[in-house]
Image (cartoon, coloured by chain):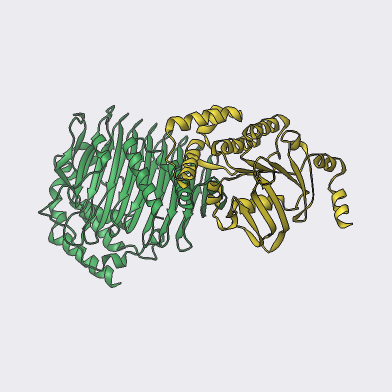
Amino acid sequence: MVMEHTLKERLLEVFTQHDLAAKSAFIGLEGFRNTAFETFKAKGFPGRKHEEYRFLNFEPLFKPAHEIQPVANTLKEPAYPEWDKDCFRIVVINGQLIRQWSNLDGLPSAITIGSLQEALEMKNVKALAAIGTLASNDDDPFVALNSALFNQGVFIHIPDKVTLDKPLHLYITNQGNTHLFTQPRILVIAGKQANASLIQHFATATLPASFTNSLCEVQADEDANITMYCVQNEEENQSLVNTIEAHISKFCNFKTVTVTLGGKLVRNNLNVVLDSAECEAHLYGYYHPKNQQTFDNHTLVDHKFPHCNSNELYKGVVEEGGHAVFNGKVFVRKDAQKTNAFQNNKNILLSDDATVNTKPQLEIYADDVKCSHGSSTGYLDPEQLFYLRSRGISLEKARALLLKAYAAEVLDQIELESLHQHLSEQIEAINHQV
Amino acid sequence: MILNKKKQVNMLKISNLYARVEEKEILKGFSLEVKAGEVHAIMGPNGSGKSTLASVLAGREDYEVTAGEINFDGKDLLELSPEDRAREGVFLAFQYPVEIPGVSITNFLKTALSEQRKYKGLPDMEPKEFLQRMKDKKALVEIDNNLTSRSVNEGFSGGEKKRNEIFQMAMLEPKLAILDETDSGLDIDALRIVANGVNRLKTPQNAAIVITHYQRLLDYIVPDFVHVLVDGRIVKSGGKELALELEEKGYDWIRKEVEA
């Protein structure tokens, strides 16, 4: 593959030229970088034959040369959405934390939010202990690439018993005049009984096509309560691989809501490891790909210990020319007795020319568990449409009403009212264009 | 004298209607005239075309009209979309009301009323007026207060679903109500509530077509005319006593009479 050859060469060049491994030596990351890059070199970009990526084609995206570690000199402050006012904010551009545009006024002083690289340089014990132990290079070439190339990144530490009283808005974007290939990286450590909501917000616009390979690792200690919203509103030429790897401990409650409304190719790898007994994970997703867009959600829920619960609901609307992929793995390992694990994926096709590939994958090795999965793909119910129309409601309004109700089941999981309203309105506007 | 008498025009005139679904001819020359202030009962055995008639009037797309005309208040009803028929004043109370999770009855009716008013060039109802109307009509059909905050028909009992149909009818105030087997699946108490609702909504300006298999409903909603539908057309019409005769003798009697 020509593409892979040149991009790989280019990546190699960047890796050696910038001497990233050597630069990382003083913080003890030399080996980490090198190993990650060697892993990536061995694996290469996943092609169509890669089982986990078989519905995605990265080749055309990397035809133009991409700048890999962009040094942007003239950055512009982004415009934030309305709901930002209810949040703390940090801005990440091209993978780097931009302090001057962050808003952390009133942040509890015990909480650390800063550059991951700096945290490692300062020998932050928590950061050093966690880095490289959550997401595995071997599992995914994008993880390996991010580990090898990430620049600065973000480190968030919420100590024991501390509550982040407003959600943290992580505004993640790219800026520049060339095609960019960026590697944002976030490490979140939530201590015992810590409580926090994070909003990962991808909103790259007005660039030549760029590609973001984002990695967010979350370690939640005993009894922590963590909610992650993932808002994907990139422009139609922007592509994104977003990996979230969360390891949760005893009594933890971990919840994610992923809403994908923009981008060209968007791939979410959401991996949740229930790393102790008696914890729970809730995964929700909503997506609406249209013309030439591919939105792919791969989730993995790994039950390793007994008495844990997981619940997963992903819903999508696929418009003409759009392509949605859902792959939901649930592992219930031998020791994970008394597990409750539920999964459901629903899709509505708005056109004959809309594609969905959905695959639930339950692997159960314990014998005393309650697990179920369901998947349905179809059109809007003609009986419901007729019923609404028979009361004087136009076909367009009837469709919009049904689609709004359909999305609400996922959106209602968003507790931040202003974000909930913003996304509801955005989805309503999209549905009215249908 | 005759010149002074206001000529009462038909609200609905169905002439020689033929309709089919999936290649199967079901209505075969159906004709009916309904004037304002009248209640017509359409009775007939299973498979005679009763529900097809309701579906064709409401504009369900699976049904194909192959011949005949339907004139509603001077308009060609068959030319209108289902929503425009509703906006013109046609209301179908469904035999099997569909569940719509996630759409509350309040939101649904607010939207429906707003769309109907827009069609007539009227502004949206004031929220206060809307709530008052909801309150009044709920009392009329003896519907639970919290039912309207729930999703349309979701988890409703059979009786609740039928009452909800009549409640919608009360809210939308149609000119012509078509009740498609509204009595099916109702116990006697639910039947009485539904029938009372319909009776209280009756005015000299509106009309109703009550489609039913059994005479039972007609004890409560007393029709001006009873028509017997057999094999896709009306074979006998009469007053309310015809319903009693049918109850007594069954439909075979009519069939024999028709064949004779």
Q: In this view, does A30 lie above or below B212?
A: below
Task: Give the letter of the yellow chain.
Answer: B
Regarding residue A332, the answer to whether it shows in the image is: no
Provide residue B186's location: percent of width, then percent of height.
70, 35
Provide residue B240's location: percent of width, then percent of height.
78, 39
Residue lying farthest to the right in this orientation? B260
Residue located 58% across and 38% down the image: B169
Residue located 43% across and 32% down the image: B127
Provide residue A42's location: percent of width, then percent of height.
29, 63
Regarding residue B29, the answer to whether it shows in the image is: yes
Residue located 27% across and 30% down the image: A165
Q: In this view, does A74 lie to the left or right of A341?
A: left
Q: Is residue A70 left or right of residue A132?
A: left
Task: Give the letter of the green chain.
Answer: A
Q: Is residue A1 above or below residue A344?
A: below
Residue lying farthest to the front in this orientation? B1
The image quadrant that residue B56 belongs to is bottom right
